[in-house]
Structure formats: structure tokens, C-alpha cells
């Protein structure tokens, strides 16, 4: 018997598999570089959140300083008579006859 060789047609699809996978991976990473949470679209949103949080931090620091000043006025060694009067009226729910009381929650 004679040995015969089998001839196959060259498929062009086999030559496109590796470039197709590479292009798919490139598109995947490009999409997430643009639209991801940390991508080009998400970055301005993060910067906006940073600015809002810095503003909130500044307001909280101001509030903390005000509270510290009020606490210093209640120090037993240096009592401020106005602060003692204010605290006594608030805790006892008392007011003078000629005063107008505005209740806040």
C-alpha cells in the first residue's frame, strides 16, 4: 500500500483567534479605564466627593471648637455666671416673667 498524505485547506479563522482574543482583552481594559469606578469618568465624581467631605470636615472642626469653648466656660475653676444661669434655666425649665422663651429641639 502506498502512503497517502491528507491535504487540508488552510483556515483563515485559525489565524484570527489570537488577535481576536488580544483585541477583546484590549477592549475590556479600555472600557474599564474609561467607565470604571476609578476611570476617567469616575474621577471627577471622586474629586467632587472629596471637596464635599473637606467642607463637612471644616464645619465639624468649627463646631468642635465652639463646643470646646463652651466646655471651658463650665470648668469649675473658672465658672462663667452667664453660662451657669443658662444651664440652670435649661435644665429646670425656668424663665423670668418678662422674658420670651423660644424652644428649640
Image (spheres, grey):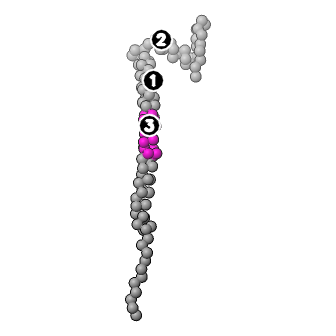
Residue 6 location (% of width, % of height)? 42, 82
**Residue picked out by circle 1:** 63
Residue at 42 percent across and 47 percent down: it is: 33
Q: CA distance from mark 3 to mark 2?
A: 49 Å
Q: Nearer the viewer, residue 67 or 23?
A: 23
Find residue 13 and report its horizontal and vertical position in percent.
44, 67
Span of residues in magenta: 34-50
Circle 2 SS class: helix
Can you give x and y, in whole percent of width and height, for residue 99 in the image?
58, 8
Q: Could you classify mark 3 by the number of other residues whose Cα lies within 10 Å: few (under 14), some (14-19), or many (20 or more)?
A: few
* Quadrant of the image containing the C terminus: top right
Q: Which SS does the magenta portion mostly show?
A: helix
Circles 1 and 2: CB atoms closer than 8 Å: no
Sequence-wise, the earlier of marks 1 and 3 is 3
Residue found at the very far bottom of the displayed protein? 1
Q: Is residue 93 magenta?
A: no
Q: Nearer the viewer, residue 52 or 58?
A: 52
Residue on which disc 2 sits: 82
Q: Residues within 10 Å of mark 1 (few under 14, many from 20)?
A: few
Q: In this view of the protein, can residue 14 be seen by the observer?
A: yes
In the displayed structure, 22 sits above or below 48; it is: below
Q: Provide residue 1's location: percent of width, then percent of height.
A: 40, 93
Task: Give the mark toward the camera: 1 or 2.
Answer: 1
24 and 1: which is toward the camera: 1
Amino acid at each position: 500500500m502506498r502512503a497517502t498524505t491528507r491535504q487540508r485547506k488552510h483556515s483563515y479563522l485559525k489565524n484570527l483567534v489570537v488577535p481576536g482574543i488580544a483585541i477583546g482583552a484590549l477592549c475590556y481594559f479600555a472600557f474599564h479605564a474609561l467607565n470604571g469606578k476609578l476611570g476617567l469618568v469616575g474621577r471627577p465624581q471622586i474629586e467632587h466627593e472629596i471637596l464635599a467631605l473637606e467642607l463637612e470636615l471644616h464645619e465639624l472642626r468649627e463646631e468642635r471648637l465652639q463646643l470646646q469653648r463652651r466646655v471651658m466656660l463650665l470648668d469649675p475653676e473658672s465658672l462663667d455666671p452667664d453660662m451657669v444661669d443658662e444651664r440652670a434655666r435649661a435644665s429646670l425649665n425656668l424663665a423670668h416673667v418678662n422674658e420670651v422663651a423660644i424652644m428649640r429641639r
